[in-house]
Image: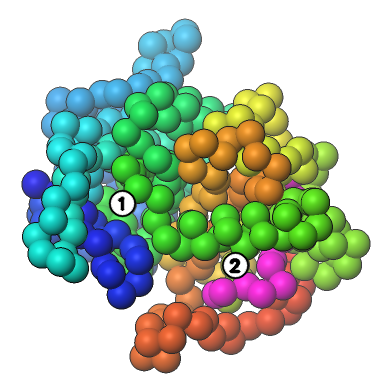
Amino acid sequence: MSSLRFDVTTGDWIIFAPERARRPNQHKQDRVSPPPAPDAKFCPFCPGNEGASTKEIHTIRDPSSGAWQVRVIANKFPALRIEDDINRHEDGRLFRRMGGCGAHEVVIESPEHDVYLAHQSAAQIERVLITLHQRFNDLMRDLRFQTIIIFKNHGEGAGTSIRHPHCQIIATPVVPRLMRLKHRVAIDYFDQMGRCLYVDLLNDEIIERDRILLDNDQYTAVMPYASHVPYQIRIFPKRREASFGHADPASFSALAQLLKAVLQKLHYGLNDPDYNMTLNTVPRGDEDEEYFNWHIDILPRLTNPAGFELGSGMAINVVLPEEACQSLRAVEP
């Protein structure tokens, strides 16, 4: 059973999920070429193996053949569970815990075992985005959930355990402290300036142009001025919405095209690096606020945090974003 424990020294909740230690691990291999075909090792996410996976939650199917194109299932080794206790308990004056209530879903991005998201068609990436949007809004109908975290781990160094391309969704009963901090900074800026911090950031980046990687009518990919890791990429929608749940699905075709181009530049420019991709949005209750603009962060895992970073919380980045941007702009997939 999962649980959350409160760290009084940081003001944050920690998820304890012992069952996740049982996850399978398909060992990393050279990824200059695509990973091995599914018959090289049993894959629970491949077509034909649906019976080996957990409950199917949502599916997009080909209207002509009926074959699935995107599939959502419950995580077999969840960090949090819908049926778990949400009540809080006191184990002592400074020891507080709550049940591991939440949701943990896996979005299988394609039936193809050996095709990364960067190499899927823009139409297939759009299906994935539509699926994430639908699942986000469906999960937020459960009033126990305070926020939804959507993320993708690409490569063993980024935390993936199954090679078949997939991303994940976790709904939590509390808002993580780092998210609260980002929102508080944006709220303070809005209170002072009367404008959205992230809209101003995007507008200033567009004016300078030095860190704009790619751009279309509806979305912009930026290498942030204060990037936390080498080659960090942030994708902004040009139409401000605080919540991903309020994003216009009609814009996902443009997002899919931009995301594909960005991921291909990373794949070919950096020899298919491990990376984490996260979707940043507001918690329950702030969906209509003006202080935030949802966005996507792509964080390549080219360096490992060491003692200073872990002890201080301050990042050390060895590549200036202007140089990173110039390098990736030159990449032609």
Q: How many marks?
A: 2
Q: Amino acid at mark 2?
A: Gln
**Dot 2: what SS?**
loop
Would residue 100 appear left or right of 35 to someone viewing this image? left
Q: Which residues are magenta?
A: 219-229
Quick one: quadrant of the C terminus? bottom right
Left or right of residue 121, residue 8 in this image: left
Q: Quadrant of residue 170?
A: top left
The image shows residue 263 at horizontal and vertical percentages of 58, 54
Residue 1, position in %: x, y?
Answer: 9, 47
Residue at image position (62%, 45%) is 294
The image shows residue 198, relative to residue 64, as above or below, that is: below
Residue 163 - label? 1
Q: Is residue 235 visible?
A: no
Amino acid type shown at disc 1: Arg
Q: Nearer the viewer, mark 2 or mark 1?
A: 2
Is most of the magenta stretch helix, strand or loop? loop
- Give above or below for 246 relative to 313: above
Mark 2: few/some/many CA within 10 Å (<14, 14-19, 20+): many
- Image disc number at residue 232: 2
Percent across and percent down for residue 116 are 46, 48
Q: Is residue 169 visible?
A: yes
- Look at 47% across and 27% down and name the residue there: 137
Up the image or down, 144 lies above or below 237; here it is above
Q: Residues within 10 Å of mark 1 (few under 14, many from 20)?
A: many
Say which of 180 and 274 sits in front.
Answer: 180
Point out the tag, 2 or 1, that comes first from the N-terminus: 1
